[in-house]
Image (spheres, grey):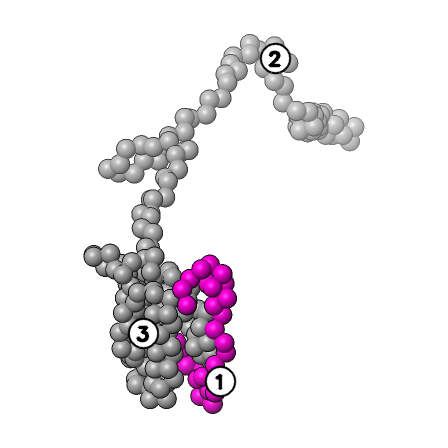
Amino acid sequence: MSRIIGGIAIVGALPLAYWLGTRTATADRPALTARESGAPDRSVSAPIRKPPVIPAVREGSPAEPESAVSAPPSEPLEPPQQEPSALEHRDRVVAELRASGVDRRLGAPASTVVNGWSSKLARFAVGGSFEQEECYAKGCFVTIVHPSLQEAEKATDIITRTGEFNGWQAGKMRSGPIAHDDGRVELTWVMYPPPPDGHVLPETLPPDNFEELMRRGSPQ
């Protein structure tokens, strides 16, 4: 009896062991593909197409290529500044002198200088009409009106050789020629002040330097 029961137990265990072995074998093996299993392969290999790139377009504006670069707006060129005329420059200097206030200390030395220039232009027969000199804290000036540009150039050559010109103990300046409609030319001479503790003119003026003019045959 016991043998019968043991046989039944063995026979009953066979289906269970087969089922377990089947599951184990199935789990260890990969699934067969259709080609390995003999089934027809119905897969189709097709190229992958990328969707076209559509550039972004703002609403209400036409489409522009991405490579387009907007050029910076051109700036208008400033017109070149013109140099002031001789008259404008002279008037600007004179206005600055007058605005500095009257200076009595320079009056007498400036009168000495102007009188010396006038007598020496007359000595060389160079025409020139002297206006009244004016002196201020920032300097003195005098304007001379000559019959022509040639006479104005001769007067400049003489004045710059005088002891009065070279004896003035500070800077000097001459304006550019200012032409009148009738052909006359005026020049304005500016004599700047020396330091407050300095002398305007020395006690003895340096000698005139007219030797070259004499060699040219100019009248004495």
Q: CA distance from mark 1 to mark 3?
A: 23 Å
Residue that numbered label 1 is attached to:
204
Does residue 3 appear in this view? yes
| Towards the viewer: 219 or 108 | 219
65 relative position to 6: left or right? left
User: Looking at the image, is mark 2 or mark 3 nearer the viewer?
Assistant: 3
Label 1: few (<14), some (14–19) or many (≥20) C-alpha neighbours in 10 Å:
few
Per the image, label 1 sits on a secondary structure element best described as: loop
Position of the C terminus by quadrant:
bottom left
Q: Give me the residue at 41% from left, 81% from top.
A: 193
| Towards the viewer: 202 or 17 | 202
Q: Amino acid at mark 3?
A: Val
- The relative height of residue 220 versus residue 33 in the rendered view (above or below) is below
Q: Give me the residue at 39% from left, 37% from top.
A: 69
| 121 drawn magenta | no
Q: Position of residue 77 (x, y in %)?
A: 33, 48
Would you identify the image quadrant in which residue 140 lies? bottom left
Q: N-terminal of the two: label 2 or label 1?
A: 2
The segment highlighted magenta reads 191-220
Position of the N terminus by quadrant:
top right
| 208 drawn magenta | yes
| Towards the viewer: 173 or 127 | 127
Q: CA distance from mark 2 to mark 1?
A: 131 Å
Residue that numbered label 3 is attached to:
142
Residue that numbered label 2 is attached to:
35
Q: Give me the residue at 35% from left, 74% from top.
A: 119
Q: N-terminal of the two: label 2 or label 3?
A: 2
